[in-house]
Image: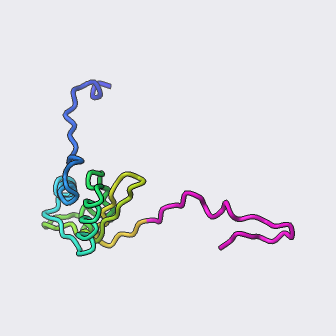
Amino acid sequence: MELVEKPQDFKYIYDDKDMIKEKILKVATKIYGAKDVKYSNEANENIEKIEKLGYGNLPICIAKTQYSLSDEPKNLECKDEYDINIRDVELKSGAGFIVVLAGNIMTMPGLPKVPAAESIDIDENGDIIGIF
Protein backbone atom coordinates (compact mmCIF):
# COMPACT_ATOMS: atom_id res chain seq x y z
CA MET A 1 0.00 0.00 0.00
CA GLU A 2 2.89 2.37 0.77
CA LEU A 3 4.28 1.93 -2.75
CA VAL A 4 0.92 2.75 -4.33
CA GLU A 5 0.65 5.96 -2.35
CA LYS A 6 4.12 7.21 -3.36
CA PRO A 7 4.32 9.61 -6.32
CA GLN A 8 4.92 7.75 -9.56
CA ASP A 9 7.06 8.91 -12.47
CA PHE A 10 5.56 6.54 -15.03
CA LYS A 11 6.26 7.38 -18.68
CA TYR A 12 5.34 5.51 -21.83
CA ILE A 13 8.21 4.38 -24.06
CA TYR A 14 6.70 6.12 -27.08
CA ASP A 15 4.04 8.69 -27.89
CA ASP A 16 1.05 7.62 -30.01
CA LYS A 17 1.95 10.45 -32.40
CA ASP A 18 5.35 8.85 -33.13
CA MET A 19 5.74 7.25 -36.55
CA ILE A 20 5.43 3.44 -36.56
CA LYS A 21 9.16 2.84 -37.10
CA GLU A 22 9.99 5.22 -34.27
CA LYS A 23 7.68 3.28 -31.94
CA ILE A 24 9.27 -0.01 -32.96
CA LEU A 25 12.79 1.38 -32.52
CA LYS A 26 12.02 2.71 -29.04
CA VAL A 27 10.58 -0.63 -27.86
CA ALA A 28 13.39 -2.63 -29.48
CA THR A 29 16.20 -0.52 -28.01
CA LYS A 30 14.77 0.60 -24.66
CA ILE A 31 12.97 -2.60 -23.65
CA TYR A 32 14.61 -5.44 -25.60
CA GLY A 33 18.13 -3.94 -25.61
CA ALA A 34 18.59 -4.23 -29.38
CA LYS A 35 21.15 -2.13 -31.22
CA ASP A 36 18.91 -1.41 -34.20
CA VAL A 37 15.88 -2.60 -36.19
CA LYS A 38 16.01 -4.16 -39.67
CA TYR A 39 12.92 -4.32 -41.90
CA SER A 40 11.94 -6.64 -44.75
CA ASN A 41 10.58 -5.04 -47.93
CA GLU A 42 7.12 -6.35 -47.03
CA ALA A 43 7.27 -4.73 -43.59
CA ASN A 44 8.37 -1.41 -45.10
CA GLU A 45 5.52 -1.49 -47.64
CA ASN A 46 2.92 -2.32 -45.00
CA ILE A 47 4.14 0.40 -42.65
CA GLU A 48 3.81 2.92 -45.47
CA LYS A 49 0.27 1.69 -46.28
CA ILE A 50 -0.85 1.79 -42.63
CA GLU A 51 0.42 5.32 -42.19
CA LYS A 52 -1.20 6.47 -45.47
CA LEU A 53 -4.52 5.04 -44.24
CA GLY A 54 -4.21 7.23 -41.13
CA TYR A 55 -3.66 4.44 -38.59
CA GLY A 56 -0.06 5.28 -37.69
CA ASN A 57 -1.19 6.66 -34.32
CA LEU A 58 -2.29 3.23 -33.06
CA PRO A 59 -0.19 1.44 -30.43
CA ILE A 60 2.08 -1.39 -31.54
CA CYS A 61 2.28 -4.96 -30.31
CA ILE A 62 5.50 -6.79 -31.17
CA ALA A 63 5.01 -10.53 -31.70
CA LYS A 64 8.34 -12.32 -31.21
CA THR A 65 9.79 -15.40 -29.57
CA GLN A 66 9.23 -15.73 -25.83
CA TYR A 67 12.61 -17.38 -25.37
CA SER A 68 14.79 -14.33 -25.90
CA LEU A 69 14.72 -10.53 -25.79
CA SER A 70 15.95 -10.74 -29.38
CA ASP A 71 13.89 -12.21 -32.22
CA GLU A 72 16.20 -15.25 -32.25
CA PRO A 73 14.95 -18.04 -29.90
CA LYS A 74 18.44 -19.50 -29.41
CA ASN A 75 19.93 -16.15 -28.32
CA LEU A 76 19.04 -16.74 -24.70
CA GLU A 77 21.50 -14.41 -22.99
CA CYS A 78 21.77 -11.60 -25.58
CA LYS A 79 25.38 -10.93 -24.55
CA ASP A 80 26.45 -9.68 -27.99
CA GLU A 81 24.90 -6.74 -29.83
CA TYR A 82 21.92 -7.75 -31.96
CA ASP A 83 19.28 -6.22 -34.21
CA ILE A 84 15.58 -6.96 -34.16
CA ASN A 85 14.41 -8.21 -37.58
CA ILE A 86 10.89 -7.16 -38.57
CA ARG A 87 9.39 -9.56 -41.08
CA ASP A 88 5.94 -8.02 -41.44
CA VAL A 89 3.56 -5.46 -39.96
CA GLU A 90 -0.22 -6.00 -39.81
CA LEU A 91 -2.99 -3.52 -39.09
CA LYS A 92 -5.65 -4.74 -36.65
CA SER A 93 -7.91 -1.69 -36.95
CA GLY A 94 -10.88 -3.31 -35.21
CA ALA A 95 -8.77 -4.19 -32.20
CA GLY A 96 -7.07 -0.80 -32.31
CA PHE A 97 -3.41 -1.75 -32.67
CA ILE A 98 -0.65 -2.67 -35.09
CA VAL A 99 1.01 -6.11 -34.87
CA VAL A 100 4.73 -6.15 -35.64
CA LEU A 101 6.03 -9.63 -36.53
CA ALA A 102 9.66 -10.07 -35.48
CA GLY A 103 11.72 -13.00 -36.73
CA ASN A 104 10.15 -16.36 -37.48
CA ILE A 105 7.04 -16.01 -35.33
CA MET A 106 3.59 -17.38 -36.10
CA THR A 107 0.38 -15.85 -34.79
CA MET A 108 -2.92 -17.52 -34.15
CA PRO A 109 -5.75 -16.72 -36.52
CA GLY A 110 -8.47 -14.42 -35.28
CA LEU A 111 -11.95 -15.72 -34.68
CA PRO A 112 -14.83 -14.63 -36.92
CA LYS A 113 -17.69 -12.50 -35.58
CA VAL A 114 -20.07 -15.39 -36.21
CA PRO A 115 -18.57 -18.81 -35.38
CA ALA A 116 -19.11 -21.61 -37.92
CA ALA A 117 -20.78 -23.64 -35.17
CA GLU A 118 -23.82 -21.37 -35.38
CA SER A 119 -24.67 -22.78 -38.82
CA ILE A 120 -24.26 -26.44 -37.84
CA ASP A 121 -27.49 -28.28 -37.12
CA ILE A 122 -29.27 -31.62 -37.46
CA ASP A 123 -32.03 -31.87 -40.06
CA GLU A 124 -35.33 -33.77 -39.78
CA ASN A 125 -33.60 -36.97 -41.01
CA GLY A 126 -30.96 -36.81 -38.27
CA ASP A 127 -28.23 -35.75 -40.69
CA ILE A 128 -25.68 -33.13 -39.65
CA ILE A 129 -25.88 -30.05 -41.87
CA GLY A 130 -23.89 -26.83 -42.13
CA ILE A 131 -20.40 -28.31 -41.90
CA PHE A 132 -18.31 -26.73 -44.61
User: In this rendering, is residue 40 above or below 92?
Assistant: below
SS assignment for the magenta stretch, majority:
loop
User: Would residue 72 be seen by someone viewing this image from the given angle?
Assistant: no
In the displayed image of the protein, which residue is found farthest to the right? 125
Q: Measuring from the top left, give residue 25's x and y in whole percent.
A: 18, 58
For the point 28% across and 55% down, the residue is 54
Residue in the foreground of this view, choosing between 25 and 115: 115
- The stretch in magenta equals 108-132
**Picture quarter containing residue 27?**
bottom left
Q: Is residue 132 left or right of residue 69?
A: right
Q: Position of residue 101 (x, y in %)?
A: 31, 66
Residue lying at 28% horizontally and 68% vertically, measured from the top left: 46
- Image quadrant holding the N terminus, namely top left
Q: Nearer the viewer, residue 80 or 108?
A: 108
Q: Does 107 lie within the magenta span?
A: no
Q: Position of residue 131 (x, y in %)?
A: 68, 71
